[in-house]
């Protein structure tokens, strides 16, 4: 089954075309890495697919439901944005209980789920403290627990390891792999290319709101190969440079180009 399907999805902010006729098809159960330069339209795409902003034109479905059907969609999705929405004046437990109530989740199994996630992310010492006292990494961990409470089918993760120390980042990456193994579809946007390279089954490179390359990381590397070994970083730099047709791959072997 297809988890996410977009047809000519477009978002225009005034004169800025943030997402431009984007047509994607993401199979269920894959980790889909989203790469792209700053301002490419990655967050805008995620915000449209999570119903937080309306497209100017085009359409999309997530797990078969149109993104216009917010109530149906929120059952399927969990979204970890770059700045997670948390109430500073609440404790971690209170925040999670608030979300449990909002989503009308059953008390006991949800509490068990919270306990195991709090344990997995080493949050025990923080969970009863006010969120205002949390570090950025601790906020990020709590936000991750929050989006997993209802067992979403599709997770949208925007820079999920931002602010995490190496141990916490490793834990979160292991959890991403475990969730993927359980069949969760994961849309993973990160500027840290080794993370995308390690976890993604498919990578989509977005530039100027358009999909300029897509494929398995190894396939993209092979496609860009011209004798020497190419990293995903090389591929990224090549397909996102300002060429008339960036999908055609490298024109200039030296890597130099006018900007
Ligand atoms: N609310 C908004 N109002 C006006 N312009 C916006 C708004 N949100 C995004 N944009 C513009 O849309 C374009 C795409 O932005 P977006 O945040 O989606 O990019 P991104 O790929 O997530 O970037 P980054 O990697 O820096 O987070 C940018 O030119 C940005 O300035």
Image: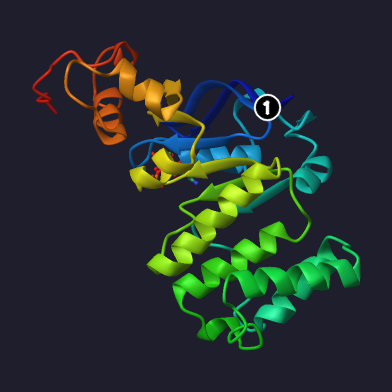
- Residue at (60, 42) in percent of width and height: 186
Task: Give residue 75's position: percent from left, percent from top.
Answer: 80, 47
Relative to 9, residue 110 above or below: below
Q: Is residue 37 visible?
A: yes
Label 1: how many Cα within 10 Å (few below 14, some 14–19, many 20+): many
Task: Give residue 94's position: percent from left, percent from top.
Answer: 73, 80
Q: How is the image coloured?
A: rainbow
Q: Is residue 85 visible?
A: no
- Residue at (52, 40) in percent of width and height: 44
Judge from the rendering whether residue 231 lies leftward or rightward of residue 83; answer left or right. left
Ligand 1 is within 8 Å of the C-beta of the residue at disc 1: no
| Quadrant location of the N terminus in the rendered image | top right
- Residue at (59, 46) in percent of width and height: 156
Judge from the rendering whether residue 220 lies leftward or rightward of residue 46; answer left or right. left
Task: Give residue 45's position: percent from left, percent from top.
Answer: 54, 36
Judge from the rendering whether residue 93 lies leftward or rightward of residue 201; answer left or right. right
Judge from the rendering whether residue 235 lies leftward or rightward of residue 58; answer left or right. left
Q: Which residue is mark 1?
A: 60
Q: Secondary structure at mark 1?
A: strand
Task: Give residue 179's position: percent from left, percent from top.
Answer: 65, 49
Q: 167 or 151, which lies in front?
A: 167
| Quadrant location of the C terminus in the rendered image | top left
Q: 20 or 224, which lies in front?
A: 224
Of the four image quadrants, the one with ligand 1 is: top left
Relative to 5, residue 143 above or below: below
Q: 6 or 168, which lies in front?
A: 168
Q: 101 or 117, which lies in front?
A: 117
Q: How many marks?
A: 1
């Amino acid at each position: 089954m297809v988890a996410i399907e977009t047809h000519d999805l477009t978002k225009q902010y005034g004169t800025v075309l943030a997402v431009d006729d984007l047509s994607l098809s993401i199979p269920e159960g894959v980790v889909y890495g989203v790469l792209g330069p700053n301002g490419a339209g990655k967050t805008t795409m995620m915000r449209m697919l999570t119903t937080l902003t309306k497209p100017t034109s085009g359409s999309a479905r997530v797990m078969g439901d149109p993104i216009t059907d917010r109530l149906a969609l929120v059952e399927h999705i969990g979204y970890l944005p770059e700045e997670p929405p948390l109430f500073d004046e609440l404790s971690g437990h209170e925040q999670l209980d608030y979300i449990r109530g909002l989503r009308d989740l059953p008390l006991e199994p949800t509490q068990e789920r919270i306990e195991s996630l709090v344990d997995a992310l080493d949050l025990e010492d923080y969970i009863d403290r006010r969120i205002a006292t949390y570090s950025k990494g601790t906020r990020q961990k709590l936000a991750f627990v929050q989006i997993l409470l209802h067992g979403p089918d599709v997770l949208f993760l925007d820079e999920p390891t931002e602010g995490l120390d190496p141990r916490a980042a490793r834990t979160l990456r292991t959890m991403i792999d475990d969730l993927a193994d359980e069949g969760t579809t994961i849309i993973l946007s990160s500027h840290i290319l080794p993370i995308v390279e390690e976890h993604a089954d498919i990578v989509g490179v977005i530039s100027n709101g358009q999909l300029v390359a897509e494929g398995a990381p190894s396939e993209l590397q092979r496609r860009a190969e011209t004798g020497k070994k190419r990293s995903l970083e090389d591929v990224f730099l090549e397909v996102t440079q300002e060429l008339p047709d960036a999908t055609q791959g490298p024109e200039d072997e030296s890597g130099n180009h006018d900007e």
